[in-house]
Image (cartoon, rainbow, N blue to C red):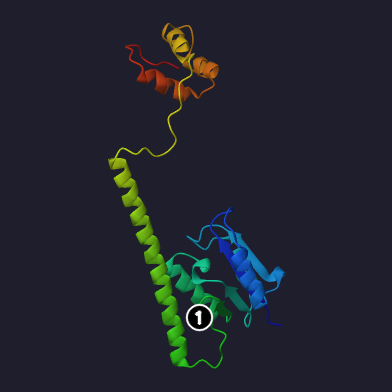
Amino acid sequence: MNCTYGYVRVSSKDQNEDRQLIAMREFGVLERNIFRDKQSGKDFNRPAYQKLLKKIRPGDTFVIKSIDRLGRDYEEIIEHWRVISKERGVGIVVLDMPLLDTRKKDRDLTGTFIADLVLQILSYVAQKEREFNRQRQAEGIAAAKAKGVKFGRPPKERPAEFYGILKDWRCGKLSARKAARQLGIAHKTFTRWASECPSKQTIQG
């Protein structure tokens, strides 16, 4: 008996997958046949996806909401599409793009060619858009840095007792590690702070 399976993917645990799940149920995919990944689509080493690949058999149907839920890499999307639909003999349905439905047995050579062409164009456009977004982000960060905008965590403030402990360390009363413990900071943080305070004395552990 042929089965219909759905694949749902979001990029992170805090993203909502409800829209994809609703589409799967409306299509008629049983809850037990919906495989979900909360992981980036940068590659295909995803637990649920790999489990689904082992599950599907010739004549089954593989359903996704949109082509970018399958993955993000243009070449890998094309390769996995080929393996699933042609090598494994599984029908693929992309709900947001009716042209991408390989179940249609009456489709002639021209129809199949058009579907393959649409897939390649969509995958290529999706990848180029991601590349443009990364480029725009990098350019935005570079422009912000040029204006003096700081990124990352703000530097940790030195507690008031730091300078007294620093004096004891420089007098040899404390080791750097003991000084760090008293301040509740890492040894490297203490030595960095100490090096930033003018002194002729070499930092010692």
Rendered location of residue 147, percent (x, y):
29, 40
Identify which residue is drawn at 33% across, 50% down: 140
Quadrant housing residue 184:
top right
- Residue 60 visible in the picture: yes
In the rendered image, the residue lying farthest to the left is 146
Query: Which quadrant: the N terminus?
Result: bottom right
Number of marks: 1
Residue 190 pos. (x, y %): 45, 21
Q: Quadrant of residue 146?
A: top left
- In the picture, measured across the screen, residue 203 lies left or right of residue 183, that is left
Could you tell me residue 193's position as x and y percent? 41, 21
Say which element carries label 1: loop
Give the answer, above or below, for where 194 lies relative to 46. above
Residue at image coords 31%, 37%: 148
Would residue 198 be found to the left or right of residue 46 on screen?
left
Q: Nearer the viewer, residue 47 or 182?
A: 182
Provide residue 103's location: percent of width, then percent of height.
57, 85
Please tell me how crowded label 1 is: few (under 14), some (14-19), or many (20+) other residues with Cα within 10 Å.
many
Residue 73 vertical position relative to residue 81 in the rendered view, above or below = above
For image coordinates 56% across by 91% down, the residue present is 105
Name the amino acid type tagged 1.
Leu
Q: Is residue 54 visible?
A: no
Q: Residue at x 50, y 80 (%)?
A: 100
State whether residue 199 is above or below residue 22: above
Between residues 98 and 59, which one lies in front from this camera angle?
Answer: 98
Q: What residue did someone put label 1 on?
A: 100
Quadrant where the image shows the C terminus: top left
Residue 36 vs residue 40: left or right? right
